[in-house]
Image: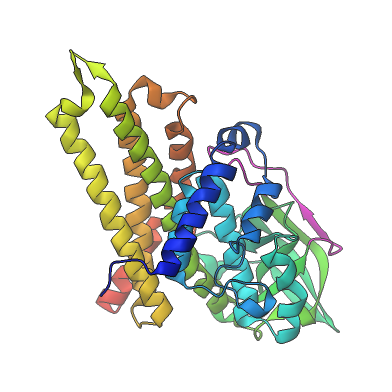
Amino acid sequence: MDFQLSQDQRAFQSAARDFAAGEMAPHAAAWDEDKVFPENALRAAAALGFAGIYVREDVGGSGLTRLDAAIIFEELAAACPSTAAYISIHNMSSWMIDRFGTGEQRRAFLPKLTSMEHFASYCLTEPDSGSDAAGLKTKAEREGGDYVLNGTKAFISGGGRSDIYVVMCRTGAAGAKGISALAVPKDTPGLSFGAQEKKLGWNSQPTAMVIFENARVPAANLLGAEGDGFKIAMMGLDGGRLNIAACSLGGARACLEVARDHMQTRKQFGKKLAAFQGLQFKFADMATELEAARLMLHRAADALDRGGEDAVMHCAMAKRFATDAGFRICNEALQLLGGYGYIRDYPVERILRDLRVHQILEGTNEIMRVIIARKLLGS
């Protein structure tokens, strides 16, 4: 067990931190306020290798580990959790093509995804199937050399803007074994999009329904074999859960730092807030929870990198713990700032709004508890 980062890890941690401070943090409030999808900043992040962090190098990826990714996403999210989270989703979608695609599919899709010339979205959730992902209804019927898709996906990050949609759809009977995965280009006839959702947070990324009405997709775009889609989706989510946990850590760390600076300068009753023992205790608990969440996340990332038999459980544990702790730390930071925490002159309220959804997506934290309990109890 070595809790020190390697020299390479420190180098890309520093690169991510510098990029976040210089290219994301100064604009994050405006992106949130004006609902801007920052394509130039995203492509600049891709130039540093952050669009294909654990995609193989022969198609433009960085070939790094899940632990490396966790380190990078914490740094990016300290500036803008919303934008960092979209980069996470793009990475997850790209990895699914890299891991399960043929050589031809990898060469066709990934060079433009790893440069972010093209953007990618992950399409699992539907209006009537959220936590019950295996109950999805979007159907793909084989007709000659194509699949004909009909159905609707909901709450899709990048919806309407992304160029490639990794879509889980039903090609067989009910249940998980009847689900397949298709890579669907944006220009596919029969593909359309709903109105942009009006959200509490995550305003720097578009979110919309993705609608298929007799959309014809070449059968050559099938990822893996028919019936592999649910397995592919769940394996993608294992990494996605780690990334979103890391985004929670980054946002929470930024709020903790704002709260620290405020406590060291703000005076009430003739002394600095940092001198009040009750507030010291609160701050100490916030810092301890952040550190505990980081350790759990890095442990889970290492398990996934090693292919450990308990990796799925550890990913669920880390996602549940880190996203709950991250939101709680932001909320406590807002309380420490008082009225200043509630206004948009400070980043805490924006980060709090962004982090709230982390407890819902990539599998709700209630579903994380189900995964953990099933593994431990054998149910």
Is 4 in front, or is 374?
Answer: 4
The range drawn in magenta is: 186-207
Q: Position of residue 262 (x, y in %)?
A: 32, 27
Is 260 in front, or is 299?
Answer: 260
Q: Name, please, the residue furthest toward the left.
A: 277
Q: Quadrant of residue 43?
A: bottom right
Is 220 in front, or is 143?
Answer: 220
Q: Quadrant of residue 45?
A: bottom right
Q: Residue at x 78, y 82 (%)?
A: 220
Q: Residue at x 35, y 66 (%)?
A: 5
Q: In screen coordinates, is 357 left or right of 321?
A: right
Q: In screen coordinates, is 230 left or right of 269?
A: right
Q: Is residue 347 magenta?
A: no
Quadrant assignment for the N terminus: bottom left
Q: Position of residue 109 (x, y in %)?
A: 74, 72
Quadrant assignment for the C terminus: bottom left
Q: In screen coordinates, is 190 left or right of 90?
A: right
Q: Position of residue 344 (x, y in %)?
A: 49, 26
Instruction: Check the image and report above or below for 193 versus 314.
Output: above
Q: Name, please, the residue furthest toward the top.
A: 270
Q: In screen coordinates, is 294 left or right of 277?
A: right
